[in-house]
Amino acid sequence: MEMKKRITLELRNRKPSEVKELVLDNCRSDDGKIVGLTSEFENLEFLSMINANLASISNLPKLGSLKKLELSDNRISNGLDVLAERTPNLTHLNLSGNKIKDISTLEPLKKLKNLESLDLFNCEVTMLNEYRESLFELLPNLTYLDGFDADDQEAPDSDPEADGDGLEEEDYDENGEDGEEEEDEDDLEELSDEEEDEDLGEEEEEGVDEEEDEDEEDEEDQASPRGEKRKRDLDEEEDE
């Protein structure tokens, strides 16, 4: 999709000044330049143009509020001086996968006084001797280069889950669910015990009833012969 058309779609009937994040990844730009982006995006804080076939950022408009700029996997080899002029408040810049070969190409970044994080993965410049030392010397305000500081300490992840909040919340939910499941199991066991007791009670009652019926039948059987004998005795007396 063309970059200009993509920008129109991303607006979603909003004014450019209302947009704070704009993702134009995988767009195709005319002649390797930025198209359709204007300074009307004055409140834009995050801009991503990954794999947009960019060879130049000379058409980048003035974006005074921009903090993070993603330009990885393009064909940029120079012209970074426009960043200090048009994105003076930039704090994070990703140029990974571009055609940057020399430290001198990065010298214009010295003017970005707020730049804290710079990524140059898969750029030829990273193969130079003392690459990291040279960059930290060139950019004294830089905190993280390719995800690590000057002491090789990894940058903290800004993802809430990585900070632990998301994990704690997830653990809490899991514990809560486990607790509910255990309660349900206990309830089922109690119900099963009650049903077993009821069944046993019914069986005992049935057993008692059967015994009573058997006793009554035995009494009837025992009473029947005695009644017949008494009747015979009376008949003999009458005959006499």
Image (cartoon, rainbow, N blue to C red):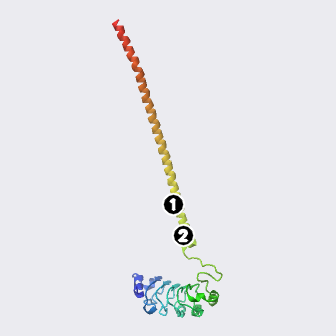
The picture quadrant where one finds residue 167 is bottom right
**The C terminus lies in which quarter of the figure?**
top left
Q: Is residue 77 left or right of residue 153?
A: left
Residue drawn at point x = 38 percent, y = 17 percent: 228
Amino acid type, residue under disc 2 in the picture:
Gly
Instruction: Mark yes or no: residue 44 visible.
Output: no
Residue drawn at point x = 43 percent, y = 23 percent: 219
Residue, far right = 151
Q: Mark 2 or 1 closer to N-term?
A: 2
Residue placed under numbered mark 2 in the picture: 166
**Vertical order, 213 against 136 (above or below):** above
Q: Secondary structure at mark 1?
A: helix
Amino acid type, residue under disc 1 in the picture:
Glu
Mark-to-mark CA distance, 2 and 1 = 16 Å
- Image position, residue 180 (x, y; %): 51, 57
Mark 2 burial class by Cα count in 10 Å: few <14, some 14-19, many 20+: few
- Image position, residue 53 (x, y; %): 46, 88
Instruction: Mark yes or no: residue 232 visible.
Output: yes
**The N terminus lies in which quarter of the figure?**
bottom left
Mark 1 burial class by Cα count in 10 Å: few <14, some 14-19, many 20+: few
In the image shown, does 147 or 123 lie closer to the viewer? Answer: 123
Q: Secondary structure at mark 2?
A: helix
Residue drawn at point x = 37 percent, y = 14 percent: 231
- Image position, residue 238 (x, y; %): 34, 8
- Image position, residue 34 (x, y; %): 45, 90
Q: Is residue 108 left or right of residue 209?
A: right
Residue, far left = 239
Residue placed under numbered mark 1 in the picture: 177
Q: Is residue 218 left or right of residue 123?
A: left
